[in-house]
Image (cartoon, rainbow, N blue to C red):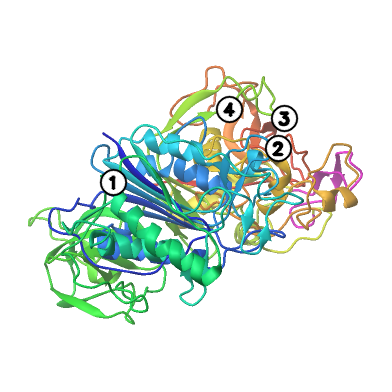
Amino acid sequence: MLRAFVGLLCLAWMAGIGGSFAADAPSHRYSVAVIIGNKTYQGRIPEVAYAHRDADAMKAYLTQVLGYREGNIIDLRDATKAELEAAFGNAYSHEGKVWRFMRPGRSHVTVFYSGHGVPGLKDKRGYILPVNADPNTPEINGYPVDLLYKNLAALEAESVTVYLDACFSGESDQGMLIRSASPVYVQSKMPETKGGLTVLTAASANQVASWDEENKHGLFTWHLLRALQGEADQEPFGDGDGRVTVAETKAYLDEEMTYVARRRFGRVQNASVQGTGDELLGVVTSTPSAPPAAEQPKVAALAPSFDVSDLDQTMVVAGARVNVRSGPGTEFEKVATLDGGADIEVTGKVEGKNWYRVALAGGGSGYVFGTLLSDRAPAPAQPVVGTFPATLSPGDSFKDCDVCPEMVVVPAGTFLMGSPSYEKGRNAKREGPVHRVRIERPFAIGKFEVTKAEYAEFVTTTGYSGGSSCKTTDGTGKWEDRSGRSWHDPGYRQSDREPVVCVSWQDASAYLEWLSRKTGKTYRLPSEAEWEYAARAGTTTARSWGEAADLACRFANVHDQTSASTNNFSHSAHECDDGFPQTAPVGSYSPNAFGLHDMIGNVGEYVEDCWTESYTGAPADGSARLDGDCTKRIIRASSWSKSPAFARSAGRAGADSADRYDNDGFRVALPLD
């Protein structure tokens, strides 16, 4: 039976309060959490000043008090709609990151969100507001609360706990988010819960919850965490049995939080509950004899933030005697020592650092520098000498040489390739039929498109002739093969950090042969299926950031108003301004959920596949399709010169394998076998 505890925290703040559960508390070894702090919004939307602190405190509570493993926490700050959909799924599938991380029937799930929420002016639904969204059109770019409930209810979880830190009236401490609207008029109708969900609401739809500027957290959450750790279990709120229920928590909030809101801020703020009052929310080690002082929270000061990728392997202590630290660095406190040759359970790797998280014998975890651990020897007859790098995990990045492209590990998975019939701008023949593809193994793909500097190293080293002509428009809108144009000079100014253009599929293949020889690895172009899988990054919307084309300028270099004012193209432009009339330096825009930049826009990207007009007969295993017209190759990613209809995850085109265009380049891929 799915049990979910859902809190709607209206502009709330979190205070760090610690403690530990009794021995009979649920095990959280396999529990999964999503922690979201949306503080800084685009445009005129006021920031949620304490959202990041809220998220930090909830993360500390989950790890230090409940025992959640850091590698099982999906930590998002200033999340976009694409990132929310990647975590929770969308209207078509609930199989987002939470679904992938959890173990059916064994995982508890906690979701915390601190940030703005708004009502839909048309449908009156409550929406979580991504940082790149317009509060006036949440039906297009918001994340519906009822969809969150639905997707979480579909998980085969042991329990689900959700705290949504948002008001849904469209009002905030700093005024209305929605232009020319009153709070009464835009009051949202929050969804009723079904399927065992218990909803704890900090304030009603037309109320604004309060910030506590003294503690720099939210009033509701400060009291919530104090309640969960025992204060709600004491008289007059609870029965002192060491179990904190929904009814006890509500009683505490009604008495303590509501009074403080009225006395300190002159506001009415009432908590409400949907669901069963005897559902368990917290367990305490013993009933406190007196409530802890508000100015002395029990959770230790939060360490500097870092991300950890989950691992599950045994390694060997390589040093004679190795220190274990409380965090990934020598500045952290020493918490244990390990003897050389001892087996140690490695539970995670810190992203961007050569530090590993290890399980300690007495419980808890610590961190060991990577060179002090080695892979476990397979057998005494085959002794292992020296140390070895850990297996790469999804999200890890690496470079095989100084002049090599930076690579990102993409996880295995399945997705629907192509565009559905209702997608605006789709080419029905080229982008159908929609078919399921399974990427069986993780692979690496370029974090960025191959740059001019990276390609120049290849040309300088090999003496490769990159041609002396290129198809360009020279701003006229008419494509012609012009002599004197090349990757070195495409007819517009480029820096070394911009993607190389005026290269053909054959030129890209020559570069990959050189890179493979240089590194001893088999670099190649991605297959078309791998490319679309990486571009979607777990989303099913037209673009990785959502459906709206005109939000592109935050995420991509497209044919925008700057381009339209420079280039005489006849087709339409995006109604936004990305600041570049042609190519932009790689990484200038926000990455997708896989950490990849410019998967849409900047330049079109060659893939390995031969040209086919449709997906009829396409392989389902993610491999390249080589049964088409191989004198032509497929190009993905749109570019700085294409119309909004092309700038979609499913958009595809083709070109002769020997042709060079000033808006096309490539990205590299690498198997991890």
Type of amino acid at the residue the image marks with label 4: Gly
How busy is the neighbourhood of tag 1: few (under 14 within 10 Å), some, or many (20 plus)? Answer: many
Please tell me whether mark 1 sits on a helix, a strand or a loop. Answer: strand
Kindly report the secondary structure that dominates the magenta region of the rendered protein.
Answer: loop
Q: Is residue 144 left or right of residue 468?
A: left
**Placement of 601 over or under 303, stated as above or below:** above
Q: Where is the C terminus found, in terms of image quarters?
A: top left
Cβ atoms under marks 4 and 1 closer than 8 Å: no
Identify the mark nearer the N-term, 1 or 3: 1
> Is residue 229 among what the camera can see?
yes
Tag 4 secondary structure = loop
The residue depicted at 23 percent of the width and 80 percent of the height is: 334
> Which numbered disc, 3 or 4, marks the residue that appears first in the sequence?
4
Q: Position of residue 124 (x, y in %)?
A: 62, 38
Q: Amino acid at mark 1?
A: His
The part of the chain drawn in magenta is: 466-489
Gap between marks 1 and 3, in whole Å? 41 Å
Q: What residue does disc 3 label? A: 425
Q: Earlier in the sequence, mark 4 or mark 1?
A: 1
Given residues 405 and 286, the one toward you in this image is: 286
Per the image, the residue denoted by label 4 is 418
Q: Is residue 473 magenta?
A: yes
Type of amino acid under label 3:
Gly
